[in-house]
Each structure stands twice: as structure tokens, then as C-alpha cells.
Image (cartoon, helix red, strand yellow):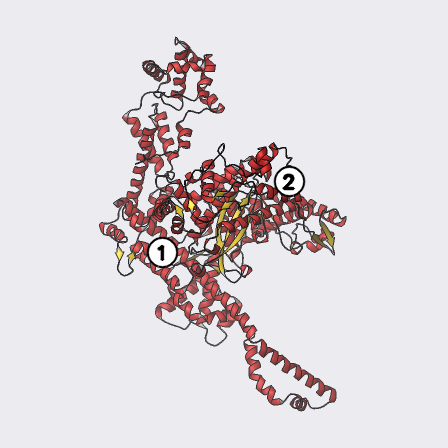
Amino acid sequence: MTRRTLLSPEERQALLGIPDDEASLIRHYTLSPQDRLQAEVRRRPQNQLGYAVQLCLMRYPGRILGVDESPPAAMVAYVAEQLEVDPDAFALYSRRYNTRFDHSRRLAHYLGVRTATREDRRAALVAAINVAMGTDQGLPIATAVVNAFRERGALLLPDGALEKIGIAGRAIARQRAEAALLEGLSPERLDSLDALLTIDPAIQQTRLSWLRTAPDAPGADNLIGLMDRLTFIRFMAVDPQLRERIHPERWTQIVREGDAAPAWLVADFNAYRRRATIVAQLITLGERLTDEAVTMFNKLIGRLFARANTRRKQRYADTRQDTTKALRLFRDTLRALVVANDTGRNAIDVLDDEIGWHRLLEAKPEVEAMVQDADPDPLVLAAERYGPVRKYAARFLETFTFRSSRRHDSLLAAIGTLKTLNAAGRRTLPERAPVGHLTSQARKLIFADAKPDRRLYEIATLAALRERLRAGDIWVEGSRAFRPMDEQLMPKPTFAALKAADELGLGVQGDVVAYLSEARQTLDFDLKRLAYRARNGKLEGVRLEAGQLVVTPLPGDVPAAAEELKWELGDMYPLVEVPDLLTEVHAWTGFANQFTHIRTQESPENIPAMLAGVLADATNLGAKRMAAASKGITAREIAWKRIFHTRPETYKLAQACITDRHSQHPHALLWGDGSTASSDGQFFQASDRAGPRSDVNLHYGSEPGSKFYSHLSDQYGYFSILPISATESEAPYVLDGLFDHETTLDIQEHFTDTGGASDHVFGLFALTGRRFAPRLRNLKDRKLHTFEKPETYPALQEHIGVPINTGLVMEYWDDLLHLAASIQTRTVAPSTILKRLAASRNPSQLARALRELGRLERTLFMIEWYSDPALRRRCQAGLNKGEAAHKLKRAVFFHERGEIRDRSFESQAFRASGLNLVVSAIVHWNTVYLGRAVDHLRRQGRIIRPEVLKHVSPLSWEHINLTGTYAWGEKPTLVDGFRPLRLSQPLARAA
């Protein structure tokens, strides 16, 4: 069995290795005059050099020279240069063990160090335990062990012994955390935890599996199923505050391991680990099921009103024929009245002669019915489906406890009233039911008759509850997603301390007066310059027509030579199977090593199985069918890697590994420097299995599906992807990708299309110090917002809207900084904040303040958009790259007709991450061989200009076999480590 390790080879070298770079040599191995004197008193050159080398090693990294160890040549040469001896003399020093031992003993006395004792080992173990209480990462634990020896003046043990101490400390830390979670639980409670892992005959599975497999498609029965599970968890009476007994990172690790392990595997854990895992699962499942239940409730109520509006439209369509008939009768009546007026005859006689009085009498009931139902309120139509809503509404209100930031909240009072009525089995509302949460129109409908309508009241209250849950005005006890906004942001004392120290690291000044003063001057100057240029026709590609600025679409800038070169270079790519491509990219980047084991943090031993699992996600094939289509890989191996090595964080690290290496490739620099990026959503239709959970966006057709929203750098390097609902706005997720990635990219400018833009997004981009440059549709219809009156800029008066409310920005400036700092430090996802701020029909003052700031920043951007054709071209080029990359994604994600089969968000996220990773591997592989092909042509005397070459993208896939049988581990024929290019006969002979 392979020995368990704490450090990766790279980490071991960084912590315990002998450095050989110039900076480290100077820092650690520069000899003082006293050091040189100690060495120079030795008789022979080899002893002088060996003595000095040992001195350096005992000082840093703090150990003696190993038997038969040869330090790096650069290190020996650096020391030898200081002693003015030949570096080759060191080879003679290593022959005599007694001499080396004597020198090490003298050096220990000189440096004041000693051999490690049992007490030193114990102190190192304690240090390892203390650090491991908060992390499972090997490097911090090993660093603590090393520092403990150094602080005590003890020489380091061999690498293996140091790692054993760290591993032991980590194991003890785990045991202590597990014991802390279980402390105080009675034997009966512990037995009840174990019972969750036995098969319950009533449900034919373990209770733990039942709790984990909660239904996710919106439906009344499924919502009831979620609440049944929550009731069971509450019956187990596990206090959520138990998590406070241990470090948050240790808690997260226990949860992560529990999420990954199936119930049968949890049953095989030792007693402490098993029970602690179950405790953590019950607590997190309680929060997760609460979030899922509230989310499902929101979807059900939203769907109820969406369908009510659909029925409303359908009623219009159904009554069209009757309406036309009534209008014709009305037209004939008017004509008859005109005739009566013109001739002076009796109107009734004329109506009877021309139309027939009986016809009017017969039409009266129909017209009255049409008038009554002419414009039914959505609330009334929603109440027609009261029966299905009633099925879950009472249980929902009873199951959850709601809280509000408002004192004497009418909505909470209304919920209490409904709960009282439900408990008593009463159907009629009390005389003074709370109505402060209702709109005036809803009140009119509810109290239209002498007796208030209970159905309308309940549906209206549920609708108000949904709206305020989404806006964050109401929160739910025991939830993480639906909790007060303050709890999701950086703690206020931390923010105050950072602001006082001027360490927020934001893109705006802390002084709002200075910020607005500077913005006022800039905006005034830019608007006057824009007006002057517009009047005088000095705006390139923009003209002023009837007071409106009109932007001329940009012509294509891809030269014909680039198109020809693209096909020529494309024909030179080597033919490759996708397993071989992934294997080669791993050999270059080591990305598969980032899929570390969830508990040991070790890299996967079976790299082909790991790559097969990634490809199974990317191609939409799935683990079982990938195993069936692969040679030498079993479904069990792929499943094992999925359970213990595949996690969102390991996918991000693997993605960063490829993207960072790609950004450093010389050919990638032709496309950009990695400082700009674009993002866009790509729709994937859902299969029949996933359809009930997915949403329908008529923009993409009538079938349900999901969108994969991804971020792409200007070098064609993907760095983020996220599955979102097909009906969700993309704007809240634009900033998510810029913060939630592990690459070294520093994106300063970001492009999106109109779907990714909102004033809130403009505001947050400015606050966090990034530039937002969306391609806005219907630009002339978007208003500019100023500090001055519109008359100040007469040429642009048609474009100017309401003025910027500076007072609101100043009042909430600290709150805006608090939001931005929380996003900057990754305390909260930007989408979480943006969705809350945009959800309410009556925005909060904070949402309005952010909108005002966003209007200011959008106005500055629009002025530049009109003024700078280079910005328009840059944005167009960035978005074109993303749209072109969608085609490659569609080609890779081809199994199951490219339809999403996964119903859970987590599974869809794995599919999306795998797709991003494989596409990134293809892009990097293509980039490497593009560079080699260009180098080959240039060696043949071809002149290829960079301004032409930059239009040749690495998005081709015709040379890659994505289908068929996947053979893993086969060694290809390589020349100098690369596949030979495909050359035409003349080129081949020339080569």
C-alpha cells in the first residue's frame, strides 16, 4: 500500500527543499565574515566547502546534510564562490562520513542548535494539532511542525518523519473535533443517530438516504415531502449550535466528507467519526431543506400567478369572437341612432326597424358578462386554483418561523391570523384581519362583498410573503439563503476597522464628498465635450439625428488573409483522440493532480480514471456509459473518483491550472494580455427527466432547460461557469465569475451583452474597482443622468433623464462600501446581494442608492461608448470570442442530444465544470500546436504578421475525435515531446 503523505512534491520542495534561485541563495546562503572564518580554518578545500555547505543547510532549511546527498549545483557554486574554492571539490568532501559527522557536531555548537528530542517531537505534534483544528491542508500543518522545531532550536527530522508528525496531528485534531460534537449526548441519542443508517422497512431505505434524496421539482406533493423531512430532522433534536464547538473550517470539512460519502460508507466509519458525521449532516440538511422548501414555495406561488396571467390572456383570445359580435351590434346601434337623429324619427322605432329590439335584449346578458369578466385581476384568477395551494399552504406556514426587520409587521400578523384559523378549522376571516401588507386593489377585491373573501386574502398574503422573502425583508429561522442581509455580509466591526485603516481595497474613495465632487467635474466635462463633438460631426461612427445620437454598426475587421490562414493552420493540427489530448494537457499542466482526495488531500493515483470522470461530465455521457465506452476503466473507478475527488473547489483548482498555464503561453499573448474578459449564457434544453425542475424561456423555444453562464478571458481562457435558470436574469451573475475563481488572471475590464447589464451591476463594478463595458441594445432609448439640469446640455437634451440623487448616495455611502467590501473579500456572492436588491417591487433605500451610483457610472460609460470607437470594437471582439466558443461547447456536450439530464443543481454544476475544463484543455492544446505550426511556417520563410495571426482562434475541433471507444493510457508517437504536425507533401519534403 502506498505510504500516506502530507505534502505534494511541490509543497515539499517549497518547505523543506534546498532553494537554488538567485534571490533565495542570497537570502539564506550568504556567509558572514565569521562564517567564512569557521570554514577557512579547515585544512583542505573540500573540507572548507563541505563545512560551509553544512553550515548553510543547518541554518536553512535547518537540517544536517543527508548521507550521499548532493545539494543543488547552484547552491554549492554560490558558497564556493564566497570561499574562492572550486565547486567540484565538494565531491571529495562527501567521501568521508566521520569528517561530515564531526563537522555537523561542531556546527551545532556554533549555531546553537541541537538534535531533536522527544519533547521537541511532542511540541511539534501539539503545533500540528492546533493548526489542524482549523484545516486539513497539509502545507499549513507541516509548516507548523517545522516552525516548532526551529523555534526550539532543534534540527529538523527527515522529511518522512516530519510528515508523520503532521499526519498524526491532523488525525488527533479530527478525533477531538468529532468528540466535541458528540459531547453531552446520551447513549440513547447516540443509538438514535446510528439507527439512521439501518434500513427502515416503511421506506425501504435508510433514513439518512431518505433525507438526502429530497424531491426538487416544484410541486405541492414535493413541498410536503420536504416538510416531512424537516419534521423528522427536528424530531431528532440536534442543536445547530453544536457547530460552534469546533473551528468553522473543521466543521466545513466534516460536512464536506459527509456529503461525499454514501450512507453505506458512513456506516463503516468508526463510532466517533460516524456519529459526528451524522450530526453534521442533520444540521446542514436542516438548513438545506429549509432553503429548498422556501425556494420551492416561491416557485409555486410565482408559477400560480404566471399561469393566472396566461389564463387571462387566453380568456381574451377565447372571447374575441363574442367581442367582435358585440362590437358589430354596437356599430349597428350607432348607425341606427344617427339615422333617427338625422330624420327626426323616434330612436326606439328606428332601432326596432334597423336592428330589432329583441336582439338588443338578447345581447344584454352576454354584454354584461363580458364587461364583468373583461379584465379579471390575476389575484382572482390565482384564487381559482385555491385547492392545490391549500394542500401545502397551511403546512408551510406552520412549519416555518418568519421574522421581519419591521416593527409590528402586518404580514407577520396576517400569517399569525391564518395559522390561528387553520388550527381552529375556521374558514371565515375575523372582522379586523391585518391588511397593511396588501395592495389597495387586493383590498378592494377581498372586501368587495359584505363578507371578506378568505381565499383571496390567503392567496394575496402568500404572494406578499413570496415577494418579501425574495427581497430579504422577511427571513426564515434555520435558513442560510433566507436570512438577514447583515448576517451575509462582512461583520460590521471588521468593516469599520478596515475602513479606519484605509484597507478596504475598493475602487472608490472612502470620502463620498470627494468622490461625488470628482465625478461631477468629470461628468460635466465629458457631456460638454460629447455635445460639442456631436454638433460638429466629430464622433466617429456616431451621428446626431433629430436630437438623437445614432451609432452605426461596426464593420467586420477580420482580413481575408486571416480566413485563409485559419484553414491552412487548421489542416496542420495533428489528429488526436480526446483521451490522449486530456492526457497530454495533464502532462503539461498537472491539472488532474488538483482533484485531491476529500480526506487525505492526496492527488489521484489513477489519473486515467480521473480524466475519464471529467470527460463523462463534459460530454454528458455519465460515469456508467463512459466506463462502457472506455478501455481499461471501470464504472467503479470513475464513481470512486467522483465521490472522493470531484468537488466544486477541485474543479476550480484544475480549471485555474490550465487557464494559468494557457495565459503564459507566448501564442496566447497575441489575443490579449488577460486583463479583459466577457461572459454570456448558453442555453441547454432539459430532457424529460430534468424537465419538471427546469424553466421555460420562450426566447429559446417552448421546451424547458437551463443556462450555463461562463466567463472567458481575452486569451480564450475560461475561468468560471455556473448553471442558472433559463428564466433568470444574467445580470446578477456577471460579478460572480470575476470573484469566484482561483486563476491568477486580474480582469480589469469586462464585456457582456444587454442581458448582463443593470444599474446595480454598474454600481458594484465601480465600487470594486473594475470596468464594466456592456454592449447595450437600444442605446438611444437609455437616458443619461446628470447633476445639472438638462438645459445645460441643449444638444443632448433628448438623451437626459432624471438627475442623480446625490443625497441618497451620500446617506448610504458606508452601506455601499460595506456591500462592496463583503464582495471583494468573498464573504458573500455578488448574485446573492443583487438578486435581493432587485427582487422587491418597492426597492429599499440601499437598492435605490446603488441604482443612483450605477446611473452615474452608466452615464460615464455611455459617453465613452459614443466617443470611443476603440471601446466599441474591443467590446465586440470580446463578445465574439465567447459566442464562437459556444460552438465548441455544443460540439463537446453532445451525448443525450445535448440535453441536460440532471435534476439537481449540484449535478448540473459538475456537468458545467467538466465541460469548461475539457474545452479549456482543447483550447490550450490547440494553442500549443498553433504556435508550433506558425513556427514551422516561419522557418520555411513565410511572413505571418501578428495583426493577421491574432484573428486565428484556437476553437477548432475537426481534428479531435470526440466519439467512439475511449482508449486511456496509450502512448502516442512523439517527436521532441510533441505530435508531428500534418504537413502537405511540399512542406513535408522541405521539413
Which residue position is annotated with label 1?
213
Label 1 close to label 2 by CB (< 8 Å): no
Q: Kindly give the residue lying farthest to the right in the view shown.
A: 536
Q: Is residue 339 above or below residue 244?
A: below
Q: Secondary structure at mark 2?
A: helix
Q: Is residue 857 above or below residue 944?
A: below
Q: Nearer the viewer, residue 87 or 964?
A: 964
- Snapshot quadrant of residue 521: top right
Q: Nearer the viewer, residue 50 or 38?
A: 50
Neighbor class of circle 2 (other Cα within 10 Å; few <14, some 14-19, many 20+) is some
Q: Is residue 978 visible?
A: yes
Quarter of the C terminus within the rendering? top right
Q: Which mark is residue 348?
A: none
Where does residue 287 sit, x and y in percent of width and height?
A: 38, 53
- Snapshot quadrant of residue 370: bottom right
Q: Amino acid at mark 2?
A: Val
Where does residue 547 sit, x and y in percent of width and height?
A: 73, 55
Where does residue 109 sit, x and y in percent of width and height?
A: 34, 16
Q: Which tag, 1 or 2, sits closer to the chain's start?
A: 1
- Snapshot quadrant of residue 62: top left
Quarter of the N terminus within the rendering? top left
Q: Nearer the viewer, residue 48 or 590?
A: 590
Which residue position is annotated with label 2?
948
Q: Nearer the viewer, mark 1 or mark 2?
A: 2
Residue at 29% of width from left, 29% of height from top? 122
Q: Nearer the viewer, residue 538 or 246?
A: 538
Instruction: Left or right? Give the position of 362 relative to 607.
Output: right
Q: Secondary structure at mark 1?
A: loop
Q: CA distance from mark 1 to mark 2?
A: 54 Å
